[in-house]
Image: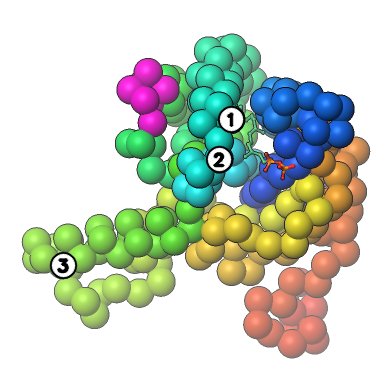
């Protein structure tokens, strides 16, 4: 499907509100995370149908380890089962799956499934789905700086070679366009250490909708709002309209 011109090339989502959604139903928080998985499925389908080529979802932050042990365990279990149950369908739908974040911290079984899913779907091109797990924007910037420092120490580059493109090429999501639109569900108005570098010029959209209730209609509301934004990238309104 050809997307209309105001369609973002890359949507990033902070999926917030699973816990409150469950609490309102007097159910454990893990129940909300399971409902969140259905919303992930619906969003992937809706992005494919709307011709959005890249979707990045914040599934587990570097700070989420601080949650109660049972909740972290339930999330790990959910990720493992989701990898077993969803990858066939994602692959048939032409989705390229990738994981960004410090995946070395996960149990070997989970890591192996992530790597296998990445390898298996690497040739797909309908939609790139990046799942951020044990991800933090500061971690991302730090690991890129560490890689550059190692390359400099090994004599493969000199400090004067380091510019924005060189830096960006060492970050997670290197090679993909930066997100045009960031959606955060659950009513909070913050970025929470998500893609700090990559969101520099993203349009931000916040909704009270809790993540398990986020569906194609909620995505359309965000896309309609995005289509009305004037993106200036530091220029004046007149300048950016003249370039459009
Ligand atoms: C935030 O809600 C959500 C999470 C920390 C987990 C996100 C996980 C999923 C949506 C499950 C499925 C994901 C995949 C990729 C299969 P919260 O718990 O912070 O909610 P609250 O703010 O209401 O407490």
Tag 3 near tag 2, CB within 8 Å = no
Residue 232: x and y in percent read: 72, 77
Colour pattern of the rendering: rainbow
**Residues in magenta?**
106-112
Pointer 1 residue = 71
The answer to whether the beta carbon of the residue marked 1 is less than 8 Å from any atom of ligand 1 is yes
In the rendered view of the protein, which quadrant contains the C terminus? bottom right
Tell which of 243 and 190 is nearer to you: 190
The answer to whether the beta carbon of the residue marked 2 is less than 8 Å from any atom of ligand 1 is yes
Q: CA distance from mark 1 to mark 2?
A: 6 Å
For image coordinates 75% across by 62% down, the residue present is: 189
Q: Does label 3 or label 2 sit earlier along the sequence? A: 2
Q: Answer with left or right where residue 143 lies relative to residue 129.
A: left
- Does the magenta-highlighted stretch encompass residue 49? no
In the rendered view of the protein, which quadrant contains the N terminus? top right
For image coordinates 30% across by 64% down, the residue present is: 145
Q: Please tell me the numbered disc located at residue 67.
A: 2
Q: CA distance from mark 3 to mark 2?
A: 38 Å
Q: Does label 3 or label 1 sit earlier along the sequence? A: 1
Dividing the picture into quadrants, the one containing residue 43 is: top right
Tag 1 near tag 2, CB within 8 Å = yes
For image coordinates 9% across by 61% down, the residue present is: 154
Pointer 3 residue = 152
- Closest to the camera, between mark 3 and mark 1, is 1
Characterize the magenta stretch by its predominant secondary structure.
helix
Examine the rendering and report whether any part of residue 96 can be seen.
Answer: no
Disc 3, SS: helix
User: Would you call the spot at circle 3 few (<14 residues within 10 Å), some (14-19), or many (20 or more)?
Assistant: some
Disc 2, SS: loop
Q: Please tell me the numbered disc located at residue 29.
A: none
């Amino acid at each position: 499907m050809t997307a209309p011109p105001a369609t973002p090339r890359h949507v990033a989502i902070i999926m917030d509100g699973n816990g409150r959604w469950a609490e309102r139903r007097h159910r454990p928080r893990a129940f909300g995370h399971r409902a969140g998985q259905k919303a992930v499925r619906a969003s992937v389908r809706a992005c494919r149908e709307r011709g959005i080529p890249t979707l990045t979802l914040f599934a587990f932050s570097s700070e989420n380890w601080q949650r109660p042990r049972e909740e972290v365990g339930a999330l790990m279990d959910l990720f493992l089962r989701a990898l077993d149950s969803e990858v066939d369908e994602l692959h048939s739908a032409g989705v390229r799956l990738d994981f960004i974040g410090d995946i070395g911290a996960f149990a070997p079984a989970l890591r192996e499934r992530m790597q296998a899913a990445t390898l298996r779907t690497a040739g797909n091109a309908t939609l790139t789905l990046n799942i951020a797990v044990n991800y933090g924007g500061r971690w991302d910037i730090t690991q890129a700086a560490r890689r550059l420092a190692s390359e400099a120490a090994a004599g493969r580059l000199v400090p004067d070679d380091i510019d924005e493109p060189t830096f960006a090429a060492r970050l997670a999501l290197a090679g993909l366009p930066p997100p045009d639109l960031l959606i955060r569900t659950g009513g909070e108005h913050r970025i929470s250490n998500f893609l700090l570098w990559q969101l520099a010029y993203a349009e931000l959209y916040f909704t009270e909708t809790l993540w398990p209730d986020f569906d194609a209609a909620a995505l359309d509301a965000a896309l309609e709002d995005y289509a009305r934004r004037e993106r200036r990238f530091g220029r004046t309104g007149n300048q950016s309209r003249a370039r459009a």
